[in-house]
Image (cartoon, rainbow, N blue to C red):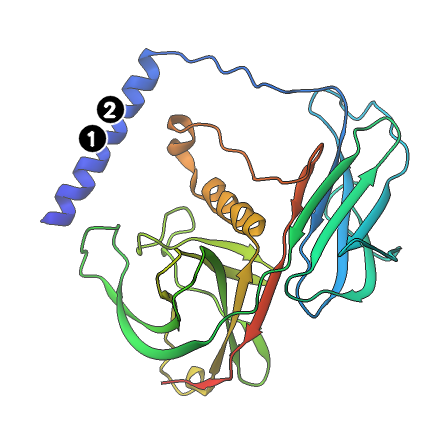
């Protein structure tokens, strides 16, 4: 009965919103549009891993690809020292004009990474980030939990069992940002699908869940305020038959630089603006910290836990 009231109230609210939308008009004039291109940068150094950077020229809507720009020139510095970069000519991108550069150098916690890029006819760009500290001492536990697929704050009594991974860290002196991916292993190793709302276009049944596509799977992200213990939980579906119970599990725990957190959070916020919500919410913009251009220079520090047996 409570669920029926809940669905009826959602229908009424939606109809009311539609009627309001029909009865008024709102003109929105985008600001800052230009007929010039901008340099796009995407670079996320990971502690202990070789450096790479993706770059392209972002074409403005107004240009219709009819402007020209000189070739991109990239410079990367770590702690003020130039890094020798080489272009990966075999790189194939899903985006027009995106190119990839790599370096053999690796970064460590505390390193300052700077990126400069320029092209004739375009504004030069710059960004800076600091590689975050390692993931601090943490305790990981695994349990089987009943999970409700209902909307936040309601109970549909439609429960399913899932594996709940809980990560607990000591209190932090400053705000910290994390991401977790679940790795499952049997005959092969792959990222597991984290447990979110059963429909592709709805929010998680857990009110505070946030996630984004990262690498070959999904990552759940967390903000841990200063002075508080990091209590982070992530769920995957529980396979309890003979075939699936052969899996065992590990966690990839990422600690983010602050720019990467803002980027990840903005990606999630864009994702959940679906359907009718897009008509009744403010325009959202993906976070960028590239001065003079667009994109991201963030950094991560990642640790993989030992494998745990399935329950």
Contact check, label 2 and label 1, Cβ < 8 Å: yes
Question: Does residue 39 appear to the left or right of 140 in the view shown?
Answer: right
Q: Residue at x 83, y 61 (%)?
A: 103
Label 1 secondary element: helix
Name the residue furthest left: 1
* Circle count: 2
Q: Is residue 207 above or below residue 15?
A: below
* Label 1 crowd bin: few (<14), some (14–19), many (20+), radius 10 Å: few
Relative to the observer, which residue lies in front, 191 or 242? Answer: 191
In percent of width and height, residue 78 lies at 76, 57
Front residue of 37/74: it is 74
Image coordinates for residue 288, horizontal then vertical, percent: 61, 39
In the figure, 89 relative to 280: above or below? below
The quadrant where residue 86 appears? bottom right
- Cα separation, mark 2 vs mark 1, equals 6 Å
**In the figure, is residue 89 to the left or right of 112?**
right
Above or below, 281 against 172 in this view is: above
Tag of residue 121? none
Q: Quadrant of the C terminus?
A: bottom left
Residue, disc 2: 16
Q: Quadrant of residue 299?
A: bottom right
Instruction: Please name the residue shown 47% across and 12% down the image.
Output: 27
- Residue named by callout 1: 12
Q: Tag 2, which secondary structure?
A: helix
Q: How many residues crowd mark 2 within 10 Å: few (<14), some (14–19), many (20+)?
A: few
Residue 212: image location, x then y, percent = 51, 53
Q: Is residue 187 left or right of residue 53?
A: left
């Amino acid at each position: 009965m409570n669920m029926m009231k809940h669905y009826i109230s959602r229908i009424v609210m939606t109809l009311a919103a539609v009627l309001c939308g029909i009865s008024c008009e709102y003109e929105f004039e985008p600001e800052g549009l230009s007929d010039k291109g901008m340099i796009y940068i995407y670079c996320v150094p990971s502690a202990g891993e070789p450096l790479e950077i993706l770059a392209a020229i972002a074409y403005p809507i107004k240009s219709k690809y009819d402007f020209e720009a000189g070739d991109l020139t990239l410079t990367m510095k770590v702690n003020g020292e130039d890094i020798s970069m080489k272009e990966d000519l075999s790189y194939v991108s899903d985006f027009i004009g995106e190119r990839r550069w790599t370096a053999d150098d690796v970064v460590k916690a505390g390193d300052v990474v700077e990126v400069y890029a320029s092209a004739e006819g375009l504004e030069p760009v710059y960004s800076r980030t600091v590689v975050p500290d390692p993931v601090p001492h943490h305790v990981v536990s695994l349990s089987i939990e009943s999970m409700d697929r209902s909307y936040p704050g309601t109970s549909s009594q439609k429960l399913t069992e899932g594996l709940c991974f809980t990560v607990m860290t000591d209190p932090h002196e400053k705000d910290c940002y994390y991401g977790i991916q679940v790795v499952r292993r049997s005959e092969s190793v792959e990222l597991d699908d984290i447990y979110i709302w059963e429909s592709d276009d709805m929010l998680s049944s857990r009110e505070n869940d946030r996630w984004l596509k990262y690498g070959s799977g999904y990552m759940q992200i967390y903000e841990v305020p200063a002075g508080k213990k990091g209590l982070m939980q992530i769920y995957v579906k529980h396979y309890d038959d003979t075939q699936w119970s052969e899996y065992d599990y590990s966690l990839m725990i990422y600690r983010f630089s602050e720019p990467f957190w803002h980027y990840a959070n903005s990606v999630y916020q864009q994702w959940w603006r679906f359907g009718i919500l897009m008509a009744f919410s403010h325009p959202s913009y993906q976070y960028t910290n590239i001065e003079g251009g667009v994109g991201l220079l963030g950094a991560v520090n990642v640790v993989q836990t030992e494998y745990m047996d399935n329950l």
